[in-house]
Image (cartoon, rainbow, N blue to C red):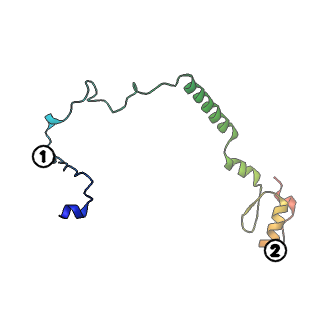
Amino acid sequence: LHECILKPFWLPARPQLRIPTPAAIRPDSLPALPRGRETQAPWSAEDTMVRGHAKEKAQEANAKKMAAMKKSGSQMDARKEGLKIVCPACKAPMTNYKCLQQHYDSKHPKETCPPEDSFAK
């Protein structure tokens, strides 16, 4: 009576699945591995496909890209070359004298901006 209430009568009854406990599994009951695969990883170098010419082209392109990156230098070096003037009051780096004048007007209004000749390299 309970089974008819919990599930529709037109659905077939599912068989009970028995899940074995670890103690019930014996090593001799496990399926055997194919010969020669006991010590190998699930994949090996033999199983992978070689791309041949495409691989060589990719390596050449990567080498050219890395060489171009080495030639261009770092951004920090370019930044140091661009920031030539340093504010004597607060040590903030500036690109040119006009920026230094604007900096003095906004950050150090009571002080006078030093002359441009004092920053010549």
Please state the horizontal and vertical placement of residue 43, each as a whole percent of the image. 37, 31
Q: Residue at x 71, y 51 (%)?
A: 79
Is residue 2 rendered to the left or right of residue 117?
left
Quarter of the rendering containing residue 66:
top right
Q: Residue 23 shows which numbered tag?
A: 1
Q: Give amino acid for label 2.
A: Glu
Please state the horizontal and vertical placement of residue 115, each as a whole percent of the image. 87, 64
| Above or below 29: residue 23 | below
Q: Nearer the viewer, residue 83 or 44?
A: 44
Q: Give amino acid for label 1.
A: Ala
* Element on which disc 2 rests: loop
First in sequence, mark 1 or 2: give its number: 1
* Element on which disc 1 rests: helix
Q: Residue at x 75, y 55 (%)?
A: 83
Disc 1 to disc 2: CB gap under 8 Å:
no
> Label 2: few (<14), some or many (≥20) within 10 Å?
few
Q: Nearer the viewer, residue 7 or 85?
A: 7
> Label 1: few (<14), some or many (≥20) within 10 Å?
few
Q: Badge 2 is on which residue? A: 111
Q: Residue at x 26, y 29 (%)?
A: 38
Name the quarter where the N terminus is drawn: bottom left
Q: Residue furthest bottom?
A: 110
